[in-house]
Amino acid sequence: MKNALNIKDIDTIPTLLFRLAEHFSNTTAVKIKSQEGIIEKTYLQLKNDSMSICYGLINRDIVEEKIAVIGEINYEWIVAYFGIISAGNVVVPIDKDLESKEIKKLLNQADVSVVFYDNRFKDIVEYVKESCKNVKLFVSFQQTEDEISIYDLINDTSNVVSHKININPDQTAMIVFAVNQNGENKGAMLSNKNICHNLIGTVLLLGEDFLKKGESTILILPPHHMFAITQLLLAMYYGVTACIGGGLGDFFKNIKLFKPAVLFLVPMIVESIYKKICKEANKAAKDLKCDIKDLIYQKSLDVLGGNLRVIFSGGAVLPPYLVDKYQEIGITLLNGYGITECSPVVACNRPQLIKKDSVGCIAPKPYCEVKIKDNEILVRGSIVMQGYYKDEISTGQAFDGEWFKTGDLGYIDDDNYLYITGLKKNLIILKDGNNISPVEIEKRLEQHPLIEIAMVYVGNKNEKDILAAMIYPNYEYAAENGIDDIESMVEKAVDEINQVIPIYKRVRKIEIQKNKFNKTQLRELYK
């Protein structure tokens, strides 16, 4: 049975919130692990609490303001998000791990006048109080003696007086900071329509009955990233329960507790999960003196709670071999591509057609349209941002007419599937005029099971520029497969890859590393 939310006429966050409460009502929207046990909030409670915050802000004449939210994802963060936008304000999510001086800079840059915060980050707030004189109100997620709390807004009986909620679809809902191609933080302005149309496009890619009401997911992505907002809104569209139980440190405990059917993860975690499954299967195989292949599926059930059937991966390049590995244990791994300025989903693999080398099928028109110009991926449609906040110059530089320039390189196949070949800002330009994306070659190298990390740069041989690669081998794989002469086998692997790529893209020199390294930092040294 298809979801009956009539998604195509949803173009504001309050409309979505009210539709969810009407359609799912007493279905559990959020589960929170606490010291008292599991606390459950229904979709109706979520709407009511969010609207109490909305009315509380309106009663205090806080409308059309920029409101920062600082903290980890939790129930308070979620209702603050819906409440702030429903009152006609703009949510400015802030990375809690930034230095206080950087947070101050971003708050001033976005003209923030109100801060919602988790009291665990009180030190940041105290610094902001002293240095950001434009902030006129601080709202804590927890009850405090000296500050208004979010529960003062929720429990304020005066809030029950209904205010008319009339949000324009083109009204800015969020200012989300993203690093542009010059390495500067820019506040991308996303409207209600941008965010809602991104949700519509994603649902149309996946199918309206892809996830089931009552299934669970676990929220672990940092909420200052749009991928986390995508997880929250997409899960709620399907009536999925969002479970909250702390950070990454409790991730595997929470999987066993909440038994999720769907997860939204970055590739690093996707890979770590599979390694954990293999490690436990390998240990059991030694104890039972049997083949590890016989235990992989059983251990995946143990590690992942037994209900997991879908993982969405985004935020970075996904090693294609993982798609096959997860398929072998009955889990669909869907790779996607997004960018903050596009709200964020541009493409996602569809469950009925998965191409493991691709970042997926492009979201449908009129929400999203992609073209390739000079190898660069350009996007237009109703998901594309309104511009960078108070920065007309950067906004102008980011667009080619009505097309947003992503800075990523790629191509589109006959099935409208998008492929990423590199980043424009990381191009290597050789003296013979050839332009090369190091990321494209690194991706090929890292697909080999013996190569864990590769960084391609310009080297020198016989006074000529050549492509060189710094390589950190997968020592665990080598040990498991009895490979002793790792250097020779890595060289052989590189030679095999060189045979299937153009001559000017071939790696002519390799450096084997015994310690892991950070590609981003080292790339600056090898420019």
Image: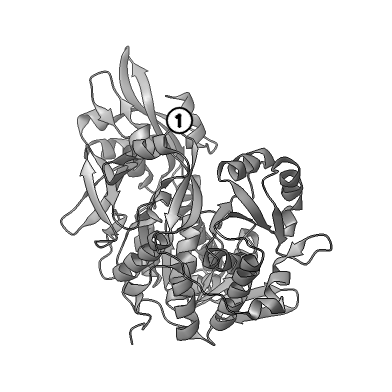
Residue furthest left as drawn: 414
- Coordinates of residue 222 in the picture (x, y in percent): 56, 56
- Coordinates of residue 432 in the picture (x, y in percent): 23, 19
Instruction: Please tell me whether residue 18 is drawn above or below residue 175 in the rendered image.
Output: below
Q: Residue at x 28, y 64 (%)?
A: 354
Left or right, 157 with reference to 308:
right
Q: Residue at x 62, y 79 (%)?
A: 161
- Coordinates of residue 464 in the picture (x, y in percent): 30, 15
Helix, strand or loop for disc 1: helix
Q: Residue at x 58, y 74 (%)?
A: 51
Callout count: 1
Left or right, 294 with reference to 320:
right
Residue 438 seen in this snapshot: no
Residue 355 seen in this snapshot: yes
Instruction: Please tell me whether residue 325 is drawn above or below residue 259 in the rendered image.
Output: above
Q: Residues within 10 Å of mark 1 (few under 14, many from 20)?
A: some
> From the image, which quarter does the C terminus lie in?
top left
Left or right, 404 with reference to 215:
left
Residue furthest top as drawn: 463
Q: Quadrant of residue 2?
A: bottom left
Q: Residue at x 68, y 49 (%)?
A: 135
Instruction: Please tell me whether residue 366 is drawn above or below residue 217 in the rendered image.
Output: above
Q: Quadrant of residue 293?
A: bottom left
Q: Which residue is mark 1?
A: 523
Task: Give the camera-side residue of 25 and 15.
Answer: 15
Q: Amino acid at mark 1?
A: Arg
Q: How is the image coloured?
A: one colour
Task: Give the camera-side residue of 476 and 447.
Answer: 447
Q: Quadrant of residue 142?
A: bottom right
- Coordinates of residue 203 in the picture (x, y in percent): 34, 70
> From the image, which quarter does the N terminus lie in?
bottom left
Left or right, 326 with reference to 33:
left
